[in-house]
Amino acid sequence: MNLKELFSQTLRVPYTEVEETAASYCFRKRGDTLFLFFEKSNGAADWKNNLDFPAKPYREMERTWFVHRGFLRVFRSLEEPLARAVTGEGVAKIVISGYSHGAALALLCHEYCVYHRPDLEKTISGFGFGCPRVVWGYLPKEVGARFKNFTVVRNCRDVVTHLPPALLGYRHVGKLLHIGRGTPQGGVESHLAENYLDALSREVT
């Protein structure tokens, strides 16, 4: 499955919503591959969490690291169904994908999967289409290594991928794939799903 196909699936799979936080997810297993999808913002609750960006420790642990508070709150509400899926029998590969708000959840999910399934570290891949910045400040080396197979996909001048501002201490982790270079799109227009699809169709992925 190439990136355009993965993004198309991310847009159209049927999502389950967690009432507590309005988090939307879809977990599917095909053969020995587990696909974990996370939906873009689709309501007022999502936007409230998007804008709740003071940094918060990910967990109280020996190596403390900080993330966007709103995204962490939403991700926490997904941990129970996520744990069941990730530790299920017959999983040999995990593919994680999210768009916009869902891309931030995909990033946190990627770290969760690598941490809880170290036996699958080399076969876990994550993609955040139009991903905002999630991690704040210094990231311990061993934590940063968990994101080596996570890719932030940025179309053209996508404004969401520049938020929260780096001046506030936020940063991208993993790899950055910049698509749609040279197209006459503004920051908001670049974030639209149809423009991601168009750019991905022109990329060799």
Image (cartoon, rainbow, N blue to C red):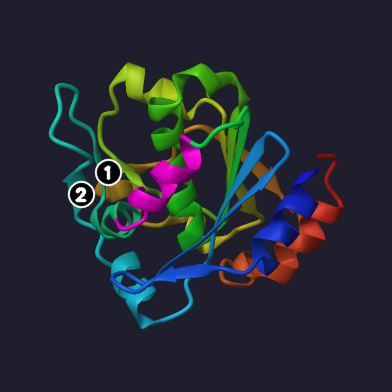
In the figure, residue 184 lies in which quadrant? bottom right
Residue designated by label 1:
169
Residue at the outermost front position: 89
* Most foreground residue, 112 or 99: 112
> Residue drawn at (18%, 29%), measured in percent from left and top?
64
> Residue drawn at (39%, 28%), measured in percent from left and top?
116
Determine the CA span between mark 1 and mark 2: 9 Å
Q: Is residue 137 above or below residue 47?
A: above
In the figure, residue 52 lies in which quadrant? bottom left
* Residue 132, image x, y percentages: 45, 54
Compared across the picture, whether 18 is left or right of 178 comes to: left
> Residue drawn at (60%, 32%), measured in percent from left and top?
91
In this rendering, which labeled residue sits more in front, label 1 or label 2? Answer: 2
Q: Are marks 1 and 2 in contact (CB under 8 Å)?
A: yes
Residue 79 belongs to magenta span: yes
Q: Residues within 10 Å of mark 1 (few under 14, many from 20)?
A: few
Please give the label number shown on residue 55: 2
> Residue drawn at (44%, 52%), measured in percent from left and top?
104
Q: Is residue 28 above or below residue 193?
A: above
In the figure, residue 199 lies in which quadrant? bottom right
* Most foreground residue, 42 or 158: 42
* Residue 4, image x, y percentages: 78, 53
Q: Secondary structure at mark 1?
A: loop
* Most foreground residue, 60 or 25: 25
Compared across the picture, whether 14 is left or right of 80 comes to: right
Q: Residues in magenta?
A: 77-87
